[in-house]
């Protein structure tokens, strides 16, 4: 399975410079973020990807768009692979707004408010990642699936602190990380 952290978002840009939450809900990619997405798509071009699972945040959807220009495969929008709710960037948008911005995808299965109301603990993020891993282990095409997700979710799933636009090859039957360091 391939895991791709979204490209640099406006939140990432401002937070990296100040270490303060800039108050940007559901941020878009920066020009660098779009470049990172295009580079990731080029690296994945020769991979046998049969499905793409995407978090419903704009930055993940925009990152996945570059890959989907190369791989014309089924898409699944999944709330369980979202970012850990900790900052303003983790406030999402209702399905009707996402559908207006990304009409090529189906959002009708999402509740109006699919993101949490409050801070998500590290333990809760790890539990969510464990459920995803178990679900993917039951699927026949998991090996040929690309997940476009976020730093904390990929970290909780693999123990790897992925950079923006970084691809991680993930073995669903590999041992789960014993200890996770929660800082980028």
Image (spheres, rainbow, N blue to C red):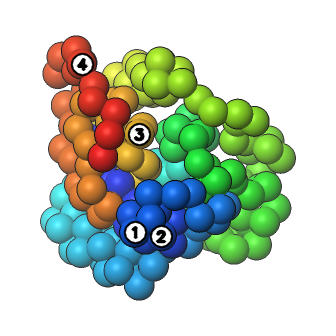
In this view of the protein, can residue 112 be seen by the observer? yes
Residue 137 at x, y percent in the picture: 34, 22
Q: Classify mark 3: residues with Cα within 10 Å, few (<14), some (14-19) or many (20+).
A: many
Mark found first going from the N terminus, 1 or 4: 1
Residue 65 to residue 96: above or below: below
Residue 80 to residue 57: above or below: above
Q: Nearer the viewer, mark 1 or mark 4?
A: 1
Q: CA gap, disc 4 to disc 2?
A: 29 Å
In this view of the protein, can residue 51 be seen by the observer? no
Residue 14: mark: 2
Residue 155 at x, y percent in the picture: 32, 36
Q: Which residue is mark 1?
A: 17
Provide the secondary structure element on which disc 2 rests: helix
Q: CA gap, disc 1 to disc 4?
A: 28 Å
Q: Residues at badges 1 and 3 in contact (C-beta under 8 Å)? A: no
Q: Residues at badges 2 and 1 in contact (C-beta under 8 Å)? A: yes
Residue 107 to residue 9: above or below: above
Residue 72: mark: none
Q: Which residue is mark 4?
A: 179
Provide the secondary structure element on which disc 3 rests: helix
Provide the secondary structure element on which disc 4 rests: loop
Q: CA gap, disc 2 to disc 1?
A: 5 Å
Compare residues 131 and 75 and report the one nearer the observer. 131
Compare residues 33 and 98 and report the one nearer the observer. 33
Query: To which quarter of the image does residue 17 belong?
Result: bottom left
Q: Residues at badges 2 and 3 in contact (C-beta under 8 Å)? A: no
Q: Residues at badges 4 and 3 in contact (C-beta under 8 Å)? A: no
Q: CA gap, disc 1 to disc 3?
A: 19 Å
Which residue is rendered at x = 43% and y = 48% of the image? Answer: 150
Q: Which residue is mark 3?
A: 152
């Amino acid at each position: 399975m391939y895991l791709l952290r979204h490209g640099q978002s406006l939140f990432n840009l401002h937070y990296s410079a100040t270490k303060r939450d800039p108050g940007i809900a559901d941020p878009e990619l920066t020009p660098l973020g779009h470049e990172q997405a295009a580079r990731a798509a080029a690296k994945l071009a020769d991979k046998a990807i049969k499905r793409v699972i995407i978090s419903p945040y704009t930055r993940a959807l925009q990152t996945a768009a570059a890959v989907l220009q190369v791989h014309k495969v089924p898409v699944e929008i999944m709330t369980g692979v979202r970012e850990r709710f900790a900052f303003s960037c983790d406030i999402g948008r209702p399905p009707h707004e996402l559908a207006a911005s990304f009409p090529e995808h189906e959002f009708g299965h999402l509740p109006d408010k699919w993101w949490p109301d409050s801070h998500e603990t590290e333990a809760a993020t790890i539990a969510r990642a464990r459920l995803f891993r178990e679900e993917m282990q039951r699927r026949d095409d998991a090996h040929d699936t690309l997940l476009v997700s976020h730093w904390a979710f990929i970290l909780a799933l693999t123990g790897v602190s992925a950079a923006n636009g970084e691809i991680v090859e993930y073995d669903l039957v590999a041992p789960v990380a014993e200890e996770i360091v929660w800082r980028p």
